Amino acid sequence: MKPTLELKISQQLTMTPQLQQAIRLLQLSTLDLQQEIQQALDSNPMLEQEDFELDSTPSSDELASGLTDFNEVSKPEQSDETREIQDEWSDSIPVDLPVDSGWDDIYPSSSNYSDSAADELAARTGITETLQSHLEWQLNLTSMVDIDRIIALSIIDAINDNGYLTLSLEEILEELRPEFDVDLNDVEMVLHCIQNFEPVGVACRDLRECLLLQLRQLSEKNRNIDNAYLIIDRYIDLLGTRDYATLMRRTHLKEDLLRDALQVIQSLTPYPGATPQYTDVEYVTPDVMVQKRKGRWTVELNPEIAPRLRINDTYASMIRKADSSADNTYLKNHLQEARWFIKSLQSRNETLLRVATKIVEIQREFFDDGEEAMKPLVLQDIAEAIQMHESTISRVTNQKYMYTPRGIFELKYFFSSHVSTSSGGECSSTAIRALIKKLVAQESPKKPLSDSKIAIILGEQGIQIARRTIAKYREALSIPPSNERKRLI
């Protein structure tokens, strides 16, 4: 073959650094975006954040949209002449401050904050206490000899997050015996001491011991507590299977006495370690705000997560077009980066607002009537409605939250699969889960609804759904099966 030269025209998408930056900002969460903005402000002298107090007050439309001010982006490069606003700034700042002025005269003292605000700040920034650290703190306040303290630390290390002892006393003894001269009675004595710590019921080996320990530590003693102690001590298996007929026959208790004893048992904590004070508190900042105004649902960006950025006039005025020096090139490059960053931030906010607005438009009935009115929705529906790619919608809805009068929801919450109805329509899986939750809440505790019965009830409402699908949705809602929901009271 003879080699030849050919010219071909083709199209291809090139991932430029600017496009990569726009995509990366689009998928960032609120916290990551704030860190990215702060990093850009620290590294790029051309970027600055507008001060609402010093600059002109933004209009209500700007605050409602929450979009960044990008007027400075479209302006041409500045000349060497100083702007008029810089002269006003220079005139408003005195050359010398008063000699007798103090720190508190310029900056407000921290003592102005109320105690409640300080407590809230401490709660948000404080280190979360674990169950083990809480038990060790109580151990340090207990008078013990050194060998007992070593045994106590070994027991505390063997306690899981639910508050139960994961090792037997013999296994703990085997770990200590090579180095220390202790016996099983010593380990058991220290265990009883730890079981008197808070939370009540900690360091127990099984559920029976945990509930009995909580009953023993109740200050008030009455007949109901004695009956509850008898049920847990001897017939906890019957209590687990909810065989109340056999339980009444074995304990010789009438229905009203058994009901009162069960109320006492239900007030106990089966997992003493899994209490809120030992779990991490997560705070969510919503990206968009949904409110109903004059009968219409409106969507706005949260101004707190969309700061107003602009180009620094002082540094921009130093750029000279015909100058190719290192300093001038440095300023030009940072000016271009600042413009691209602001443009990418604007694109992110506009896309987020468009997606959230379309979601609210489609799920308007959910905001009016609740979960039962949720419509089936997939990413492709939003992508076709706003003429964007499905992958872009996926990035926008990931780790983005919406504040509504019904609570704070992740944007992905509004997307769900569907089930066909007898009338030829579709019903959202979220709405079906809400209906299952409602039916279980209204059922008789003595005769709870089975999965098959729930499927029949939904079928009568026109929703054709299989029993195994009901079981899957019920498990997703953390609702136990009907035999475990059966109650005497």
Image (cartoon, rainbow, N blue to C red):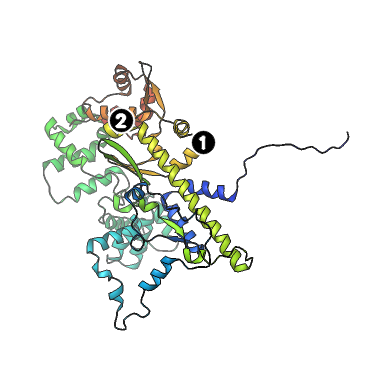
Residue 437 vs residue 35: left or right?
left
Label 2 to label 1, Cα distance in Å? 26 Å
Residue 282 visible, this orientation: no
Taking depth in this image into account, of 312 and 198 the one nearest to the observer is 312
Tell me which corner region of the image, top left, top right, bottom left or bottom right, holds residue 35.
bottom left
Q: Nearer the viewer, residue 247 or 355?
A: 355
Q: Is residue 85 left or right of residue 14?
A: left
In this picture, is 211 found above or below 458? below
Decide which of 416, 480 is in the foreground and name it: 416
282 or 16: nearer the eye? 16
Q: Which residue is mark 2?
A: 365
Crowding around mark 2 (Cα neighbors within 10 Å: few <14, some 14 to 19, many 20+) is some
User: From what the image shows, is residue 272 above or below residue 465?
Assistant: below
Q: Secondary structure at mark 1?
A: loop
Please tell me whether residue 402 is drawn above or below residue 85 in the rendered image: above
Reading the image, the residue beneath label 1 is 389
Q: Is residue 357 visible?
A: yes
Q: Quadrant of the N terminus?
A: top right
Q: Kindly identify the amino acid type of the residue bearing the numbered disc 2.
A: Glu
The picture places residue 309, in percent across and down from the top left corner, at: 43, 57
Viewed as shown, does residue 2 lie left or right of 212? right
